[in-house]
Image (tube, rainbow, N blue to C red):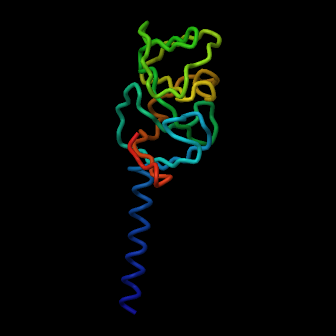
């Protein structure tokens, strides 16, 4: 009986530790679309870390849908607080300097010119597969505020054959 109680206690403690880790330390994300290809593929699963709160250009972040949907999105940080992001003829510039983006799947097809100046604690995010990414360019609320960022994606763990840091 004592052995059974100890086993039950161990299971409960393990479950509580896992709940704590998944709610306060890690975030798990499933990738449902090709918007981040070729960096993260459709069907991949990634781990992020919740407590990393400094975000740099190029970081991949997991955040609440800015337009109020009850789900999380994953995109790459392009614009930082206080910066101006401009897109002209398919070229992304920040504060007048063209970005070098080696992670892009392919060159962006030119579309209507776009410009946004970000407020403090506001980020502008886009998918790596620019020609097939429903990202901040198209949302009603184009800014992702720091409070809505759940974490920084750091590691692809599924499929196992493609495990790597991001």
Residue 123 lies left or right of residue 140; in this view the side is: left
Residue 47 in view in this figure: yes
Residue 66 lies left or right of residue 102; in this view the side is: right
Which residue is painted at 47% across and 47% down in the image? 46
Which residue is painted at 47% across and 24% down in the image? 123
Percent coordinates x, y for residue 40 in the rendering: 51, 40
Q: How many marks?
A: 0
**Nearest the eye: 73 or 119:** 73
Name the quadrant of the C terminus: top left
Quarter occupied by residue 10: bottom left
Percent coordinates x, y for residue 120 in the rendering: 42, 20
**Nearest the eye: 91 or 1:** 91
Percent coordinates x, y for residue 13 in the rendering: 38, 70
26 to 112, vertically: above or below: below
Which residue is painted at 41% across and 31% down in the image? 59
Quarter occupied by residue 132: top right
- Residue lying furthest top in this view? 96
Residue 49 in view in this figure: no
Name the quadrant of the N terminus: bottom left
8 to 125, vertically: above or below: below
135 to 91, vertically: above or below: below
């Amino acid at each position: 009986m004592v052995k059974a109680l100890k086993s039950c206690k161990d299971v409960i403690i393990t479950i509580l530790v896992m709940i704590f880790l998944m709610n306060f330390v890690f975030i798990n994300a499933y990738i449902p679309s090709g918007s981040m290809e070729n960096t993260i593929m459709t069907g991949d699963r990634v781990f992020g870390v919740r407590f990393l709160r400094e975000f740099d250009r190029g970081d991949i972040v997991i955040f609440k849908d800015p337009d109020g949907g009850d789900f999380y999105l994953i995109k790459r940080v392009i614009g930082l607080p206080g910066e101006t992001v401009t897109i002209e003829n398919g070229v992304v510039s920040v504060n007048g300097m063209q970005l070098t983006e080696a992670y892009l799947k392919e060159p962006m097809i030119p579309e209507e010119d776009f410009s946004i100046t970000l407020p403090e604690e506001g980020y502008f995010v886009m998918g790596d597969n620019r020609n097939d990414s429903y990202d901040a360019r198209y949302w009603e609320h184009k800014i992702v505020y720091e409070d809505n960022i759940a974490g920084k994606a750091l590691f692809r763990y599924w499929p196992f054959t493609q495990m790597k840091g991001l």
